[in-house]
Amino acid sequence: MTNGYPPEYPGIPATTLNCRGRLLDISRPVVMGILNVTPDSFFDGGRYAGRDAALRQAEKMLAEGAAILDVGGASSRPGAVEVSAEEEMARIVPVIAAIHQHFPDAFISVDTWRPEVAAAALEAGASILNDISAGLFGSVAPGVAPAVPPGGGENVSRPAFTKSPGATLPVPPGGRENFSRPAFTERPGATLPGAPGGGGDVSRPAFTKSPGATLPGTPGGGEDVSRPAFTERPGTTLPVPSGGGENVSRPAFTKRPGATLPSPPPGGPGGAFPGAPYILMHMQGSPATMQQNPQYEDVVTEVLDFFIREVKKLRELGVRDIVLDPGFGFGKTVEHNYQLLKNLPVFRNVLGLPVLAGLSRKSMICKVLKVNPEHALNGTTALHMIALQQGAGILRAHDVREAVQVIRLWEQLEQA
């Protein structure tokens, strides 16, 4: 037990998120700027639908202090009409690619529930997954193979294959020669390594290497690692690092003079989209129906139970960096939303994970103050301060400058 909680739920939220090999510091609260490139979002629909307009807004939000830019191409407002995956990709991929090109140090999240959209967004430069469906509508949730994995090419999830003698594996992302099965003898009961971009543990006990055979290049580049470059110590396995890829650590190998280590592939263990933090959001129903008649016996307990159940699944799939989002306004009445806000510390303390508060200009403000979203900034600012006092680590906001100012005032209060 740690801090009164079971070991798997230490009650100590992470201070960094590993975003596909880059660390995002969340030891203090940060702002996620909302960048909707949709024509029908509830507040800013149509304002940033073009690439140039979106790029200007991204620059503005980064200058104002946004730590993350959350790009979405399909509205999830109550009653929203679903758009096709093709349309969603056409909206967000050029924008994400442009942001990544102009602001390579920016952390970009993709707001989607579709696996093919998530794959394309990560390929374009996104490094965080924000899935409002928690994997229930599609298979964005890590561990479920997408139709097209990051890097493109055929999906090589192991359940889809029965390996025939002499069969070859597909070319990994970035090219490189196929390596044929004769290079390996698979031991009985051993599992095949995951597909490029993710999958199982590639521990050495699963294979006996044939003399003279070489390993393929790592996805994302790097020199081929032929076995003559290394002498493997008996009984050692290759650990999987937080940034993804095989960790060719010194305890497992004695490196021969002149041999070079490979560059690790972008990605990591467990999941269809390895190395990307996963934002797990609660929603009752779907965007089309969620606000028709949301009901709970105890909304806080039910959302907590949902998080415990889904976090366990993600952990079993090898997902390491998870952010909790109670889903304010997603299948909740005004009363439900304020009960969740009042009890926000429960989720952070029990699960030991950072919490995202998505309160910006939502109906839980508008209905109480009897204003429309255009006039809900003052209410948003008030609730942002409450969310910080209740332990929120990420504020998802339309108005970055104002949210950053709230964080500064909260920090001053904490230091008093």
Image (tube, helix red, strand yellow):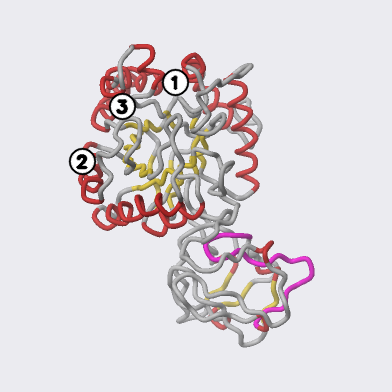
The residue tagged with tag 3: helix, strand or loop?
A: helix
Expressed as whole percent of the image width and height from the top left, the position of residue 357 reads 42, 28
Distance between the Cα atoms at labels 3 and 1?
Answer: 13 Å
Expressed as whole percent of the image width and height from the top left, the position of residue 366 reads 35, 17
Dot 1 or dot 2: first in sequence order is: 2
Q: Residue at x 61, y 33 (%)?
A: 9
Distance between the Cα atoms at labels 1 and 2?
Answer: 28 Å
Q: Residues within 10 Å of mark 1 (few under 14, many from 20)?
A: some
In the picture of the structure, the residue carrying the numbered disc 2 is 60
Residue 332 in the image: above or below residue 255: above
Residues marked 2 and 3 touching at CB (< 8 Å): no
Residue 40 in the image: above or below residue 125: above
Residue 121 in the image: above or below residue 258: above
In front: label 2 or label 3: 2
Task: Give the residue type at disc 3.
Answer: Ile
Q: Is residue 416 visible?
A: no
Task: Give the residue type at disc 1.
Answer: Gln
The residue tagged with tag 1: helix, strand or loop?
A: loop
- Tell me the quadrant of the picture where the N terminus can be found: top right
Residue at the extreme bottom: 212
In the picture of the structure, the residue carrying the numbered disc 3 is 407
Q: Residue at x 43, y 27 (%)?
A: 392
In the picture of the structure, the residue carrying the numbered disc 1 is 390
> Foreground: 29 or 198?
198
Expressed as whole percent of the image width and height from the top left, the position of residue 313 reads 64, 42
Residue at the extreme right: 188
